[in-house]
Image (cartoon, grey):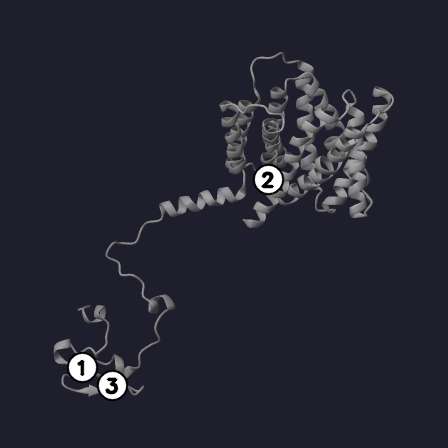
Amino acid sequence: MEATFRWALVTAIAPVAWGTNYFVTHQFLPSGYPLYGAAIRALPAGLLLLLVSGKRPRGSWWWKSLVLGTLNMSAFFALIYLAAQLLPTGVASTVMATSPVVMMLLAWALLSERPRIPHLAGAGIGIAGVCLMLFTGVAAVGVLGVLASIAAMVMSSFGYVLAKRWSEEVDVLSSTSWQLIAGGVVLVPFAVVVEGAPPALEGPAILGFAYVTVVATALAFAAWFAGLRHLPAGTVGLVGLLNPVTGVLLGTTVAGEALTARQLCGLVLVLLGILLGQPGAARLAALVRGRAGRPSSPAGAAPATAASAAGPSPPRSSTTTTSARPGTCQRPQDGHRHRGHAGSGGHPQGTPSWARNSN
Protein backbone atom coordinates (compact mmCIF):
# COMPACT_ATOMS: atom_id res chain seq x y z
CA MET A 1 0.00 0.00 0.00
CA GLU A 2 2.85 2.38 0.79
CA ALA A 3 4.42 1.81 -2.63
CA THR A 4 1.07 2.49 -4.32
CA PHE A 5 0.64 5.70 -2.36
CA ARG A 6 4.14 6.84 -3.30
CA TRP A 7 3.50 6.27 -6.98
CA ALA A 8 0.21 8.15 -6.73
CA LEU A 9 2.13 11.10 -5.25
CA VAL A 10 4.67 10.89 -8.08
CA THR A 11 1.86 10.84 -10.64
CA ALA A 12 0.23 13.87 -9.00
CA ILE A 13 3.25 15.97 -9.99
CA ALA A 14 2.00 15.94 -13.59
CA PRO A 15 -1.53 17.39 -13.23
CA VAL A 16 -0.37 19.91 -10.64
CA ALA A 17 2.38 21.11 -13.01
CA TRP A 18 -0.08 21.20 -15.93
CA GLY A 19 -2.46 23.24 -13.81
CA THR A 20 0.24 25.86 -13.24
CA ASN A 21 1.00 25.83 -16.97
CA TYR A 22 -2.26 27.65 -17.71
CA PHE A 23 -1.28 30.59 -15.53
CA VAL A 24 2.28 30.79 -16.88
CA THR A 25 1.09 30.59 -20.49
CA HIS A 26 -1.46 33.37 -20.13
CA GLN A 27 0.82 35.62 -18.09
CA PHE A 28 4.24 35.28 -19.73
CA LEU A 29 4.13 33.49 -23.10
CA PRO A 30 3.33 35.20 -26.42
CA SER A 31 -0.23 34.73 -27.62
CA GLY A 32 -1.20 33.74 -31.14
CA TYR A 33 1.53 31.11 -31.58
CA PRO A 34 0.06 27.81 -30.38
CA LEU A 35 2.09 25.61 -32.73
CA TYR A 36 5.39 27.33 -32.05
CA GLY A 37 4.58 27.39 -28.36
CA ALA A 38 3.94 23.64 -28.35
CA ALA A 39 7.10 22.93 -30.37
CA ILE A 40 9.25 25.14 -28.13
CA ARG A 41 7.72 23.36 -25.16
CA ALA A 42 8.20 19.79 -26.43
CA LEU A 43 11.56 19.77 -28.24
CA PRO A 44 13.82 21.19 -25.48
CA ALA A 45 12.08 19.02 -22.87
CA GLY A 46 12.68 15.90 -24.97
CA LEU A 47 16.32 16.79 -25.58
CA LEU A 48 16.81 17.40 -21.85
CA LEU A 49 15.44 13.96 -20.94
CA LEU A 50 17.45 12.38 -23.76
CA LEU A 51 20.58 13.90 -22.25
CA VAL A 52 19.69 12.34 -18.89
CA SER A 53 18.77 8.89 -20.24
CA GLY A 54 21.46 8.74 -22.94
CA LYS A 55 19.50 6.23 -25.03
CA ARG A 56 18.27 6.49 -28.61
CA PRO A 57 15.29 4.56 -29.95
CA ARG A 58 15.91 1.19 -31.55
CA GLY A 59 13.85 -1.13 -33.70
CA SER A 60 10.10 -0.59 -33.47
CA TRP A 61 10.52 2.36 -31.12
CA TRP A 62 11.25 4.63 -34.09
CA TRP A 63 7.63 4.39 -35.23
CA LYS A 64 6.20 3.90 -31.74
CA SER A 65 7.80 7.16 -30.63
CA LEU A 66 6.27 8.91 -33.63
CA VAL A 67 2.81 7.51 -32.88
CA LEU A 68 2.94 8.34 -29.16
CA GLY A 69 4.50 11.75 -29.79
CA THR A 70 1.72 12.65 -32.21
CA LEU A 71 -1.07 11.45 -29.92
CA ASN A 72 0.27 12.70 -26.59
CA MET A 73 2.20 15.81 -27.60
CA SER A 74 1.81 17.48 -30.99
CA ALA A 75 -1.84 16.85 -31.88
CA PHE A 76 -2.91 17.11 -28.25
CA PHE A 77 -1.16 20.46 -27.69
CA ALA A 78 -2.64 21.97 -30.85
CA LEU A 79 -6.19 20.68 -30.23
CA ILE A 80 -6.28 21.73 -26.59
CA TYR A 81 -5.16 25.24 -27.59
CA LEU A 82 -7.89 25.41 -30.23
CA ALA A 83 -10.50 24.22 -27.71
CA ALA A 84 -9.36 26.84 -25.21
CA GLN A 85 -9.80 29.54 -27.85
CA LEU A 86 -13.27 28.42 -28.95
CA LEU A 87 -14.88 27.23 -25.70
CA PRO A 88 -15.46 28.66 -22.24
CA THR A 89 -12.95 27.31 -19.73
CA GLY A 90 -15.63 25.39 -17.83
CA VAL A 91 -16.84 23.53 -20.91
CA ALA A 92 -13.36 22.64 -22.15
CA SER A 93 -12.21 21.48 -18.70
CA THR A 94 -15.36 19.42 -18.17
CA VAL A 95 -14.83 17.61 -21.47
CA MET A 96 -11.24 16.87 -20.47
CA ALA A 97 -12.43 15.70 -17.04
CA THR A 98 -14.17 12.75 -18.71
CA SER A 99 -10.76 11.34 -19.70
CA PRO A 100 -10.59 8.95 -16.67
CA VAL A 101 -13.68 7.11 -17.94
CA VAL A 102 -12.29 6.93 -21.49
CA MET A 103 -8.94 5.70 -20.17
CA MET A 104 -10.68 2.98 -18.15
CA LEU A 105 -12.61 1.77 -21.20
CA LEU A 106 -9.54 1.82 -23.44
CA ALA A 107 -7.46 0.04 -20.78
CA TRP A 108 -10.20 -2.59 -20.55
CA ALA A 109 -10.05 -3.15 -24.30
CA LEU A 110 -6.27 -2.99 -24.77
CA LEU A 111 -4.84 -4.07 -21.41
CA SER A 112 -7.64 -6.24 -19.95
CA GLU A 113 -7.84 -3.89 -16.94
CA ARG A 114 -11.48 -4.27 -15.98
CA PRO A 115 -12.96 -1.03 -14.60
CA ARG A 116 -13.61 -1.22 -10.88
CA ILE A 117 -16.68 0.18 -9.19
CA PRO A 118 -14.64 2.57 -6.98
CA HIS A 119 -12.90 3.92 -10.11
CA LEU A 120 -16.20 4.52 -11.90
CA ALA A 121 -17.76 6.08 -8.82
CA GLY A 122 -14.72 8.29 -8.34
CA ALA A 123 -14.87 9.41 -11.97
CA GLY A 124 -18.55 10.35 -11.67
CA ILE A 125 -17.98 12.29 -8.46
CA GLY A 126 -14.89 13.98 -9.90
CA ILE A 127 -16.68 15.10 -13.07
CA ALA A 128 -19.50 16.52 -10.96
CA GLY A 129 -16.94 18.39 -8.89
CA VAL A 130 -15.29 19.87 -12.00
CA CYS A 131 -18.69 21.07 -13.21
CA LEU A 132 -19.32 22.79 -9.88
CA MET A 133 -15.91 24.42 -9.88
CA LEU A 134 -15.79 25.71 -13.42
CA PHE A 135 -19.29 26.15 -14.84
CA THR A 136 -20.22 29.82 -14.42
CA GLY A 137 -23.44 29.93 -16.35
CA VAL A 138 -24.88 29.59 -19.84
CA ALA A 139 -22.42 30.60 -22.55
CA ALA A 140 -22.10 30.17 -26.28
CA VAL A 141 -20.70 26.76 -27.11
CA GLY A 142 -19.21 26.23 -30.58
CA VAL A 143 -19.45 22.84 -32.23
CA LEU A 144 -15.89 23.08 -33.54
CA GLY A 145 -14.56 23.78 -30.06
CA VAL A 146 -16.43 20.82 -28.59
CA LEU A 147 -15.11 18.52 -31.33
CA ALA A 148 -11.56 19.77 -30.77
CA SER A 149 -11.84 19.19 -27.02
CA ILE A 150 -13.27 15.70 -27.47
CA ALA A 151 -10.59 14.82 -30.03
CA ALA A 152 -7.83 16.02 -27.70
CA MET A 153 -9.26 14.02 -24.81
CA VAL A 154 -9.73 10.79 -26.80
CA MET A 155 -6.36 11.00 -28.57
CA SER A 156 -4.41 11.62 -25.38
CA SER A 157 -6.29 8.89 -23.49
CA PHE A 158 -5.55 6.43 -26.30
CA GLY A 159 -1.92 7.53 -26.36
CA TYR A 160 -1.55 7.11 -22.59
CA VAL A 161 -2.96 3.58 -22.69
CA LEU A 162 -0.68 2.69 -25.62
CA ALA A 163 2.29 4.07 -23.68
CA LYS A 164 1.30 1.88 -20.72
CA ARG A 165 1.00 -1.17 -22.99
CA TRP A 166 4.49 -0.62 -24.41
CA SER A 167 6.04 0.57 -21.13
CA GLU A 168 7.82 -2.68 -20.28
CA GLU A 169 10.04 -2.49 -23.36
CA VAL A 170 12.08 0.60 -22.34
CA ASP A 171 12.64 2.81 -19.33
CA VAL A 172 10.39 5.77 -18.56
CA LEU A 173 12.87 8.59 -19.23
CA SER A 174 13.86 7.21 -22.64
CA SER A 175 10.32 6.66 -23.90
CA THR A 176 9.21 10.08 -22.60
CA SER A 177 12.14 11.84 -24.28
CA TRP A 178 11.49 10.11 -27.61
CA GLN A 179 7.81 11.04 -27.52
CA LEU A 180 8.56 14.69 -26.80
CA ILE A 181 11.18 14.94 -29.53
CA ALA A 182 8.93 13.22 -32.08
CA GLY A 183 6.01 15.46 -31.14
CA GLY A 184 8.13 18.58 -31.46
CA VAL A 185 9.53 17.51 -34.84
CA VAL A 186 5.99 16.92 -36.13
CA LEU A 187 4.90 20.38 -34.95
CA VAL A 188 7.72 22.43 -36.52
CA PRO A 189 6.68 22.25 -40.21
CA PHE A 190 3.04 22.98 -39.36
CA ALA A 191 4.14 25.96 -37.27
CA VAL A 192 6.23 27.35 -40.16
CA VAL A 193 3.40 26.98 -42.68
CA VAL A 194 0.56 28.24 -40.46
CA GLU A 195 2.24 30.83 -38.22
CA GLY A 196 5.16 31.99 -40.31
CA ALA A 197 8.23 33.32 -38.48
CA PRO A 198 8.70 32.28 -34.86
CA PRO A 199 7.81 34.82 -32.15
CA ALA A 200 10.41 37.15 -30.67
CA LEU A 201 11.08 36.19 -27.06
CA GLU A 202 11.99 38.60 -24.28
CA GLY A 203 13.11 37.98 -20.71
CA PRO A 204 9.75 37.06 -19.12
CA ALA A 205 8.84 34.83 -22.08
CA ILE A 206 12.20 33.05 -21.91
CA LEU A 207 11.76 32.40 -18.20
CA GLY A 208 8.19 31.26 -18.81
CA PHE A 209 9.28 28.81 -21.51
CA ALA A 210 12.07 27.56 -19.22
CA TYR A 211 9.49 26.73 -16.52
CA VAL A 212 7.07 25.19 -19.01
CA THR A 213 9.83 23.11 -20.61
CA VAL A 214 11.54 21.80 -17.48
CA VAL A 215 8.69 21.52 -14.95
CA ALA A 216 5.38 21.41 -16.83
CA THR A 217 6.68 19.18 -19.63
CA ALA A 218 9.88 17.20 -18.91
CA LEU A 219 9.24 16.54 -15.21
CA ALA A 220 5.46 16.32 -15.56
CA PHE A 221 5.37 13.80 -18.42
CA ALA A 222 8.11 11.67 -16.85
CA ALA A 223 6.06 11.50 -13.63
CA TRP A 224 2.86 10.79 -15.56
CA PHE A 225 4.30 7.90 -17.56
CA ALA A 226 5.98 6.51 -14.44
CA GLY A 227 2.57 6.44 -12.78
CA LEU A 228 1.05 4.68 -15.79
CA ARG A 229 3.73 2.01 -15.49
CA HIS A 230 3.04 1.24 -11.81
CA LEU A 231 -0.66 2.04 -11.33
CA PRO A 232 -3.92 1.07 -13.06
CA ALA A 233 -4.96 3.40 -15.86
CA GLY A 234 -8.17 4.30 -14.00
CA THR A 235 -6.22 5.42 -10.94
CA VAL A 236 -3.87 7.57 -13.03
CA GLY A 237 -6.79 9.13 -14.90
CA LEU A 238 -8.46 10.13 -11.64
CA VAL A 239 -5.24 11.66 -10.32
CA GLY A 240 -5.32 13.81 -13.46
CA LEU A 241 -8.36 15.62 -12.04
CA LEU A 242 -5.91 17.56 -9.89
CA ASN A 243 -5.29 19.67 -13.00
CA PRO A 244 -8.42 21.87 -12.73
CA VAL A 245 -8.12 21.88 -8.93
CA THR A 246 -4.65 23.38 -9.26
CA GLY A 247 -5.92 25.97 -11.70
CA VAL A 248 -8.68 27.10 -9.35
CA LEU A 249 -6.42 27.24 -6.29
CA LEU A 250 -3.71 29.07 -8.23
CA GLY A 251 -6.23 31.65 -9.37
CA THR A 252 -7.28 32.13 -5.76
CA THR A 253 -3.81 32.43 -4.24
CA VAL A 254 -1.90 34.23 -7.03
CA ALA A 255 -4.47 36.05 -9.13
CA GLY A 256 -6.57 37.09 -6.13
CA GLU A 257 -9.77 35.46 -7.35
CA ALA A 258 -12.45 34.71 -4.75
CA LEU A 259 -13.18 31.06 -3.98
CA THR A 260 -16.96 30.70 -3.88
CA ALA A 261 -18.88 28.16 -1.84
CA ARG A 262 -19.86 26.38 -5.04
CA GLN A 263 -16.22 26.06 -6.11
CA LEU A 264 -15.27 24.82 -2.66
CA CYS A 265 -17.94 22.10 -2.81
CA GLY A 266 -16.71 21.12 -6.27
CA LEU A 267 -13.13 20.96 -5.04
CA VAL A 268 -14.14 18.64 -2.19
CA LEU A 269 -16.00 16.37 -4.64
CA VAL A 270 -13.01 16.18 -6.95
CA LEU A 271 -10.68 15.23 -4.11
CA LEU A 272 -13.18 12.62 -2.90
CA GLY A 273 -13.37 11.14 -6.41
CA ILE A 274 -9.57 10.93 -6.59
CA LEU A 275 -9.38 9.18 -3.20
CA LEU A 276 -12.02 6.65 -4.21
CA GLY A 277 -9.90 5.64 -7.17
CA GLN A 278 -6.83 4.76 -5.12
CA PRO A 279 -6.29 1.00 -4.61
CA GLY A 280 -5.39 1.60 -0.96
CA ALA A 281 -8.77 3.23 -0.37
CA ALA A 282 -10.56 0.15 -1.71
CA ARG A 283 -8.55 -2.16 0.56
CA LEU A 284 -9.17 0.11 3.52
CA ALA A 285 -12.91 0.09 2.87
CA ALA A 286 -12.88 -3.71 2.61
CA LEU A 287 -10.97 -3.93 5.89
CA VAL A 288 -13.46 -1.66 7.63
CA ARG A 289 -16.38 -3.70 6.28
CA GLY A 290 -14.69 -6.91 7.44
CA ARG A 291 -14.18 -5.61 10.96
CA ALA A 292 -17.72 -4.29 11.13
CA GLY A 293 -19.14 -7.67 10.09
CA ARG A 294 -16.90 -9.76 12.35
CA PRO A 295 -18.91 -11.35 15.24
CA SER A 296 -17.78 -10.36 18.71
CA SER A 297 -16.58 -12.98 21.21
CA PRO A 298 -19.21 -14.43 23.64
CA ALA A 299 -19.64 -12.54 26.88
CA GLY A 300 -18.83 -15.56 29.00
CA ALA A 301 -15.78 -16.64 27.07
CA ALA A 302 -12.62 -16.75 29.12
CA PRO A 303 -9.75 -14.61 27.89
CA ALA A 304 -6.84 -16.39 26.28
CA THR A 305 -3.98 -17.09 28.66
CA ALA A 306 -0.32 -16.75 27.92
CA ALA A 307 0.02 -20.52 27.77
CA SER A 308 -2.79 -20.91 25.25
CA ALA A 309 -1.37 -18.11 23.15
CA ALA A 310 2.02 -19.78 23.12
CA GLY A 311 0.55 -23.00 21.74
CA PRO A 312 -0.48 -26.45 23.09
CA SER A 313 1.17 -27.66 26.27
CA PRO A 314 3.48 -30.67 26.11
CA PRO A 315 1.93 -34.05 26.94
CA ARG A 316 1.89 -35.06 30.61
CA SER A 317 3.73 -38.11 31.82
CA SER A 318 1.77 -41.21 32.64
CA THR A 319 2.37 -40.78 36.38
CA THR A 320 0.74 -37.36 36.39
CA THR A 321 -2.30 -38.34 34.37
CA THR A 322 -3.17 -41.41 36.48
CA SER A 323 -5.66 -40.67 39.25
CA ALA A 324 -4.09 -40.91 42.68
CA ARG A 325 -5.61 -43.13 45.32
CA PRO A 326 -7.13 -41.39 48.34
CA GLY A 327 -4.64 -40.87 51.10
CA THR A 328 -1.62 -41.74 48.99
CA CYS A 329 0.88 -39.68 47.14
CA GLN A 330 2.70 -40.28 43.92
CA ARG A 331 6.13 -39.12 42.83
CA PRO A 332 6.20 -38.02 39.22
CA GLN A 333 9.15 -38.90 37.05
CA ASP A 334 10.39 -35.30 36.99
CA GLY A 335 10.94 -35.35 40.78
CA HIS A 336 8.09 -32.97 41.77
CA ARG A 337 5.59 -34.22 44.38
CA HIS A 338 1.80 -33.85 43.97
CA ARG A 339 -0.68 -34.99 46.62
CA GLY A 340 -4.19 -36.15 45.92
CA HIS A 341 -7.04 -35.78 48.44
CA ALA A 342 -10.32 -37.58 48.63
CA GLY A 343 -12.23 -34.35 48.94
CA SER A 344 -10.69 -32.93 45.74
CA GLY A 345 -11.96 -35.77 43.60
CA GLY A 346 -8.57 -37.35 43.26
CA HIS A 347 -7.01 -34.52 41.08
CA PRO A 348 -3.42 -33.64 41.78
CA GLN A 349 -2.76 -30.39 43.58
CA GLY A 350 -2.26 -27.51 41.12
CA THR A 351 -4.74 -28.77 38.50
CA PRO A 352 -6.57 -25.79 36.91
CA SER A 353 -10.03 -24.98 38.22
CA TRP A 354 -11.71 -25.67 34.88
CA ALA A 355 -10.32 -29.24 35.00
CA ARG A 356 -11.45 -29.79 38.64
CA ASN A 357 -14.95 -28.56 37.85
CA SER A 358 -15.33 -30.39 34.55
CA ASN A 359 -17.39 -33.17 36.18
Residue under label 1: 340
Q: Identify the residue at horizontal 38%, vertical 47% (top origin).
A: 291
**Other residues around mark 1 within 10 Å, as few (<14) / some (14–19) / many (≥20):** some
Tell me what residue is drawn at x 77 percent, y 40 percent.
Answer: 177
Q: Amino acid at mark 2?
A: Glu
The residue lying toward the viewer, choosing from 53 and 285, is: 53
The answer to whether 39 is drawn above or below residue 355 in the figure is above
- The part of the image, by quadrant, that contains residue 172 is top right
- Name the kind of residue labelled 1 in the image: Gly
Question: Gap in Å between the C-alphas at discs 1 and 3?
Answer: 10 Å
Circle nearer the N terminus (3, 2) = 2
Q: Which residue is mark 3?
A: 337
Nearer the observer, disc 2 or disc 1? 1
In the drawing, what numbered circle is on residue 113? 2
Please give the label number shown on residue 131.
none
Asked whether the viewer can see residue 98, the reply is no
Q: Is residue 206 left or right of residue 162?
A: right
Of the numbered discs 2 and 1, the one sitting upstream in the chain is 2
Q: Position of residue 341 (x, y in %)?
A: 15, 81
Going by the image, does 20 lie left or right of 269? Answer: right
- The quadrant holding residue 112 is top right
How far across and how far down the image is residue 170, in percent? Answer: 74, 46
Residue 262: x, y in percent? 50, 23
